[in-house]
Image: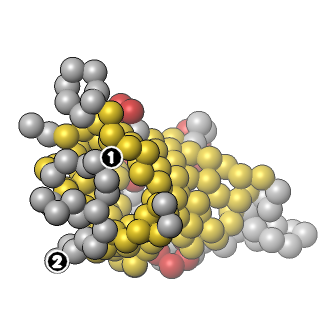
Amino acid sequence: MTTATAALPNLTAGTWAIDTVHSTVGFSVRHLMVSKVRGTFNDFTGAITVAEDGTAAVTAEIQVASIDTKNTDRDAHIKSADFFDAEQYPTATFTSTAVRAKGDDYVVEGEFTLHGVTRPVELALEFNGVNPGMGNGPVAGFEATTVLNRKDFGITIDMPLEGGGAVVGDKITITLEIEAGLQA
């Protein structure tokens, strides 16, 4: 059961659907120990459900085969059994278990499933407020981040470098830029 413990100010009760045209699910990972590769997932859905008391619950689903790192060969390798095994595990999901205040911001606690493995995660959340929108109803904005260890989700490929270190780092920074609209 999803429980939420903190109310987000000015967020009207109801279901706020993620507007994928105005949202980004991004990530970065260390590459060759000296730089970062960045990418996005282009196919995702989600919603924020706000109760009458203002508490919120979040659900989201990402199609892992929609990964885009601006390199088709790399994307194909990431989709393969070496990494995501997108054929066997086509989606990643998130379901919140709590939302709590942390200073002026929030923490969203939840269960994240990737590569067939479910683990608890915490997202640092900045609520950017609500805007009346442009004729289609109010919109709300959110920014959230977390750092995951890919090995915690069974993505254990090691590609060591000759001089030490690895081609791909273990820590993945997830960055969400979300705009959601209140559904009628």
Q: Quadrant of the C terminus?
A: top left
SS at circle 1:
strand
Give x and y (percent) for residue 71: 60, 39
Q: Is residue 11 left or right of residue 21?
A: left
Please say whether residue 113 is visible from this viewpoint.
Answer: no
- Mark 1 or 2: in front is 2
Q: Residue furthest left?
A: 184
What residue sits 64% from the left and 58% below the top?
29
> Can you identify the residue that label 2 sits on?
1
Query: Could you tell me residue 86's position as x and y percent?
Result: 39, 57
Does any portion of residue 110 appear in the rendered image?
yes
Mark 1: which amino acid? Phe
Please provide percent x and percent y for residue 56: 25, 61
176 left or right of 134?
right
Q: Which mark is residue 74?
A: none
Q: Which mark is residue 44?
A: 1
